[in-house]
Image (cartoon, rainbow, N blue to C red):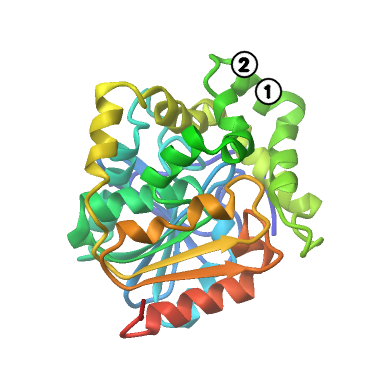
């Protein structure tokens, strides 16, 4: 793996070889290109042919968090695509549009731009929040739903407001509500805080994750201008909108049940999102729902135990009748 010193991007729809430039387009068996969707340009890494599986990263990461799953899914017969969310990695950094409804439209817009009728969505952390949202807002475009380390948005909201332990575990989100200071803290000392967060949220079972090289990749990506601000904006909306009409409307909208098969994955030692907060999200799913707990794993099951995660995901994607 190489991590070049500068960022690079091309016109929408253009393809570039892996490692063509910047801390975003990293070397690998995948292909990088940009696609246009929902009024913005999004960077994707893709490989394989078959039914589309769209991978959505969380905070404080970018598409590269799925580097293990891309080849595993491709080998299993899927078209695997990992996208950078709005404002992160190689995607556009727009001045607005970081509410979950619009970010979910980014996701479904990318599905359409890829020329696919639907996709299996796989989301981690914030990406999981958006995957839940997209499955409710655009159900015809979501074939299946797999969420890691994130409860259903209504469960997230109630846990943050009523569960002191979860509110304390998510204290970084409350801290994000301050203007400008969180961005400065994220970027200080070459984004050292990004490395500490990934280290602190990982479980003790896999001491090889994260290694220094991995942390350097995430720190470099966060150091791209405007990325820190754009990464924080969704969390600002999630908190500040709670008492506003747009937030109340979104929360009410999310009462609609998810009607596609759902796989819910969680690390038993996740310190950022407690197991108790995620458990129970199945009440919002009116379809086969499978809960899988990874013992001894923290907030990043797909990186801490990539073989077990990929095996669980692929077996479920290939199961024609995933039972409840």
The answer to whether residue 182 is left or right of residue 130 is right
Q: How busy is the neighbourhood of tag 1: few (under 14 within 10 Å), some, or many (20 plus)?
A: some
Q: In which quarter of the image is the C terminus?
A: bottom left
The answer to whether residue 291 is left or right of residue 144 is right
The answer for how far apart the CA atoms under marks 2 and 1 are is 6 Å
Q: From the viewer's side, name the closer residue of 305 and 61.
A: 305
* Residue 139 at x, y percent in the picture: 21, 58
Which residue is rendered at x = 61% and y = 22% of the image?
182
Q: Name the secondary structure under disc 1.
A: helix
Q: From the viewer's side, name the closer residue of 179 and 295.
A: 295
Asked whether disc 2 touches disc 1, contact meaning CB atoms under 8 Å apart, the reply is yes
* Residue 87, image quadrant: top left
Which residue is rendered at x = 51% and y = 64% of the image?
265
Up-down relation of residue 235 to residue 148 (above or below):
above
Q: From the viewer's side, name the closer residue of 283 and 18.
A: 283
* Residue 25 at x, y percent in the picture: 55, 51
Up-down relation of residue 250 to residue 139 (above or below):
above
Q: Name the secondary structure under disc 2.
A: helix
Count of marks overlaid on the render: 2
The answer to whether residue 91 is visible is no
* Residue 157 at x, y percent in the picture: 42, 38
Q: From the viewer's side, name the closer residue of 276 and 102.
A: 276
Which residue is rendered at x = 77% and y = 52% of the image?
213
The answer to whether residue 62 is left or right of residue 262 is right
Task: Give the residue at mark 1.
Answer: 185
Which residue is rendered at x = 30% and y = 21% of the image?
244
Q: How busy is the neighbourhood of tag 2: few (under 14 within 10 Å), some, or many (20 plus)?
A: few
* Residue 39, image quadrant: top left
The answer to whether residue 199 is visible is yes
Task: Give the residue at mark 2.
Answer: 181
């Amino acid at each position: 793996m190489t991590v070049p010193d500068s960022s690079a991007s091309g016109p929408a729809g253009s393809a570039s070889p892996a490692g063509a430039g910047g801390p975003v387009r990293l070397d690998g068996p995948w292909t990088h290109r940009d696609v246009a969707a929902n009024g913005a340009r999004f960077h994707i890494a893709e490989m394989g042919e078959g039914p589309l599986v769209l991978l959505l990263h969380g905070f404080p990461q970018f598409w590269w968090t799925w580097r293990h799953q891309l080849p595993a899914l491709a080998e299993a017969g899927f078209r695997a695509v990992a996208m950078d969310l709005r404002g992160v990695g190689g995607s556009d950094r727009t001045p607005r549009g970081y509410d979950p409804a619009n970010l979910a439209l980014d996701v479904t817009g990318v599905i359409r731009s890829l020329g696919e009728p639907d996709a299996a969505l796989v989301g981690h952390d914030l990406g999981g929040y958006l995957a839940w949202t997209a499955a409710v807002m655009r159900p015809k475009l979501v074939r299946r739903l797999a969420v890691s380390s994130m409860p259903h948005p209504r469960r997230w909201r109630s846990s943050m407001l009523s569960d002191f332990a979860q509110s304390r575990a998510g204290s970084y989100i409350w801290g994000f509500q301050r203007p400008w200071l969180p961005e400065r803290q994220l970027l200080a000392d070459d984004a050292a805080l990004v490395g500490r967060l990934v280290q602190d949220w990982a479980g003790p079972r896999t001491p090889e994750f994260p290694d220094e090289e991995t942390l350097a990749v995430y720190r470099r990506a966060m150091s791209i201008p405007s990325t820190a601000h754009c990464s924080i904006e969704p969390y600002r909306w999630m908190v500040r909108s709670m008492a506003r009409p747009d937030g109340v409307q979104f929360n009410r909208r999310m009462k609609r049940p998810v009607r596609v098969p759902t796989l819910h994955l969680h690390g038993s030692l996740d310190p950022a999102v407690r197991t108790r907060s995620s458990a129970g999200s199945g009440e919002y799913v009116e379809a086969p729902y499978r809960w899988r707990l990874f013992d001894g794993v923290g907030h990043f099951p797909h990186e801490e135990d990539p073989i077990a995660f990929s095996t669980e995901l692929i077996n479920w994607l290939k199961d024609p009748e995933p039972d409840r």
